[in-house]
Image (spheres, grey):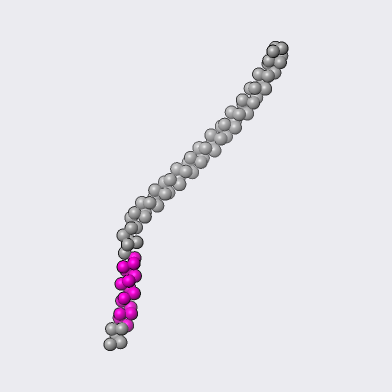
Amino acid sequence: MLKWIVLALVLVPLVVFALAVRPVLARLPQLRRAAVRLQRRADEAVALQVAAESLQQQAEGLQGRLETTQQRLTLIRARRGG
């Protein structure tokens, strides 16, 4: 009799645990695919951030060139009396 009680105390939690874990194990492939998609999007976000920083630097360089060109144009107009 004691053997059956001990066996029940061991097996019942194992069965409950197996039933609780089963849906999670069934969803693992979906979770893996989702993780891969998230990683790809994170990589794309990093690449876009790098590209945006590069464009920002180019825009700053162009702004500096524009200011220099405007100063030269002002000097040229001043020399011509314009």
Judge whether residue 63 is colored magenta. no
Q: Nearer the viewer, residue 17 or 64?
A: 17
Identify the image quadrant of the C terminus. top right
- Number of numbered labels in the structure image: 0
Judge whether residue 17 is colored magenta. yes
Residue 62, position in %: x, y? 59, 28
Q: To which quarter of the image does residue 71 belong?
A: top right
Residue 46, position in %: x, y? 49, 43
Residue 10, position in %: x, y? 33, 78
Residue drawn where x is 45% and y is 43% of the image: 44
Residue drawn where x is 30% and y is 80% of the image: 8
Q: Which residues are magenta?
A: 6-21
Q: Is residue 25 left or right of residue 44?
A: left
- Vertical relation: 44 (above or below) 7: above
Identify the image quadrant of the N terminus. bottom left
Residue 30, position in %: x, y? 34, 54
- Vertical relation: 34 (above or below) 72: below
User: Magenta-highlighted stretch: main secondary structure?
Assistant: helix
Q: To which quarter of the image does residue 57 belong?
A: top right
Q: Nearer the viewer, residue 50 or 73?
A: 73
Q: Nearer the viewer, residue 46 or 30?
A: 30
